[in-house]
Image (spheres, grey):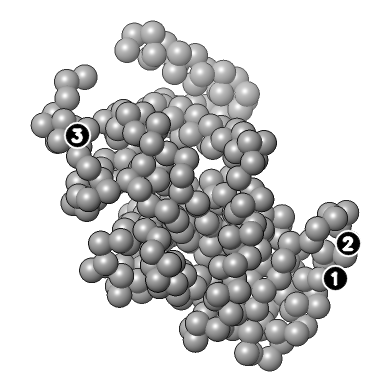
Amino acid sequence: MQKTSQDRDLASADFSRDTRALARAATLIESQTESGRKLISSLFAKTGRATLIGVTGPPGAGKSTLVDQLVHRLRARGNKVGVIAVDPSSPYTNGAILGDRIRLGDHYSDPGVFIRSMATRGKLGGLARGTIDLSLLLDAAGFDVILIETVGVGQDEVDIAGVADLTLVLLVPGLGDDVQAIKAGIMEVADVLVINKADLPGADRLEEELRFMQSLTNVSYPVPILRVIASQGSGLEGLLEQVDAVAKERKTEAQRCETWSWRLREMLRESLLSELKPADLNEHAALVASRQEDPYEAMEQLRTTLLRQRELG
């Protein structure tokens, strides 16, 4: 494929200084183009320096407020900060509100902060397609910390644990049945449990329930539990100290291998699905729906189609 003038410009751009070029590259990557993939390949040797922090939790937990406050404090330290804020897409139009462009508006004039809102476009797990690639771009561009905020539409957003170096799980008192939320599986992805809005009634009860759940596991070192009031900035310095400590522990060779094992599986899945023509998928979906083909036969046929496309391509 012949390189366009934009491809050549981006290949030679200094993303650490040229914010506009960085934004164009982010669009290329978010669109899942071949040019975007080649760009990441060319930049990959420059990655591995940034710390990726995932922020997840139920709706109303205060994720965007916490991210906003963390950006302020990280910038005060002199860190360059990237923010990937994932918003849910409409199942009908694939559009998204991308509200973090408004909620994090204070930072848009800061050259040391780059904020990108991404729509899930039907992808489950709380992240958007291209999240891994975009985090690599920001890493290569010299950002020290990359905050990834998940959509916050439920308690099954576990993909973030594979992408981020460490994950903050926000919970707040008074959002329905706390125990049910804890049992739903998100506890397993937490590296730090954060009780936000800790000034509300029920904060003590929520912490007790979290510690009780931890006592039922066989983990020698339970996940730390911290209380914050993100809207007031209360408890944020202690949270960052805990994040630093956990990040240092997690950046071992074994942990990096485990993280990349997950990332490669996810990237392979996305790559194969992007190569599959919707018409081929719909054809076999109709056959399976009418019981003319079983699902495993359909997958085998689709696999054969992909291999044939690659041979011809």
The image shows a total of numbered marks equal to 3
Nearer to me, 240 or 211: 240
Q: Nearer the viewer, residue 10 or 212?
A: 10
Residue at image x 71%, y 70%?
Answer: 225
Q: Say which of 149 and 313 sits in front.
A: 149
Q: Which mark is residue 216?
A: 2
Question: Residue 76, how many percent across, how many down?
Answer: 40, 71
Which quadrant would the C terminus be assigned to in this image?
top left
- Write down the residue under mark 1: 212
Q: Amino acid at mark 2?
A: Leu
Mark 1 residue type: Phe
- To which residue does mark 3 refer? 12
Q: Which quarter of the figure has residue 253? A: top right
Q: Is residue 98 above or below residue 291?
A: below
Residue at the spot 38% in from the left edge and 36% down from the top edge:
46
Residue 205: image location, x then y, percent: 77, 83
Q: Earlier in the sequence, mark 3 or mark 1?
A: 3
Residue lying at the far front in this picture: please name it: 78
Q: Residue 154: horizontal and vertical position, in percent?
A: 58, 63
Residue 27 can be seen, yes or no: no
Residue 282 location, quadrant: top left
Question: For the N terminus, which image quadrant?
Answer: top left
| Kind of element beneath mark 2 | loop
Answer left or right for 72 relative to 62.
left
